Amino acid sequence: MHMKHSHPQTGLRLLLLPALLWLTAVCAMPAQNLVSATEIDQSTRWKTKEQAIPVLKTQIDNWHNQLPSLQAGSPEHTSALRHAAYYKAIAKEVMQGTPLPSALENALPWAASLGGAMEATFTTKKDLRSLYDEARNLLTN
């Protein structure tokens, strides 16, 4: 009877293969964040939570009030939805105690997906950057 020899290295290779494939996939993914922590200017004077909430509420109301006059599915309607979703997500983050710079960044996926209604790839990085810059201007002193 001939016995097959088992090599301990073969088992190790089989265990490492899925980990290597996962690591390769993760490293190959494009970065989703448009704003890195190093890009956030430490000298920027952000509004306080108490100052930011009314500004955010006004933005949400303004964008929602435009919706009835816009044709559903039009670029203008989509833009209004995107703005409203972004400002709502920022407000939620701020209400939960997230600092404004992080709240703006954390809210970007909601803007990208129109509040979860679409795939995140629906919104271009240029549009997201524009939204971020707009919100930053509104929420800094």
Image (cartoon, rainbow, N blue to C red):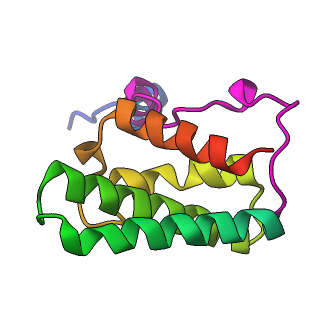
**Residue 129 placement, left or right of 122:** right
Residue situated furthest front in the rendering: 69
Residue at point 61%, 65% (across, down)? 56
Is any atom of residue 110 visible in this view?
yes
Instruction: Specify the quadrant of the image occupied by residue 72.
Output: bottom left
Identify whether 12 is placed above or below 69.
Answer: above
Q: Which of 9 and 88 is in front in this view?
A: 88
Q: Give the magenta part as a residue range.
A: 20-48
Q: Is residue 81 within the magenta segment?
A: no
Identify whether 43 is placed above or below 93.
Answer: above
Q: Measured from the top left, where is residue 98 in percent x and y?
A: 74, 61
Q: Which of 28 and 64 is in front in this view?
A: 64
Identify whether 111 is placed above or below 132.
Answer: below
**Residue 48 placement, left or right of 14:** right
- Considering the image in quadrants, where does the N terminus appear? top left
Instruction: Specify the quadrant of the image occupied by residue 119.
Output: bottom left
Q: Measured from the top left, where is residue 65 in percent x and y?
A: 36, 73
Count of labels in the image: 0
Residue at point 18%, 49% (across, down)? 75
Is any atom of residue 21 visible in this view?
no
Residue at point 43%, 29% (across, down)? 20
Q: Measured from the top left, where is residue 122 in percent x and y?
A: 23, 46
Q: Is residue 38 within the magenta segment?
A: yes
Residue at point 70%, 70% (across, down)? 53
Identify whether 42 is placed above or below 131.
Answer: above
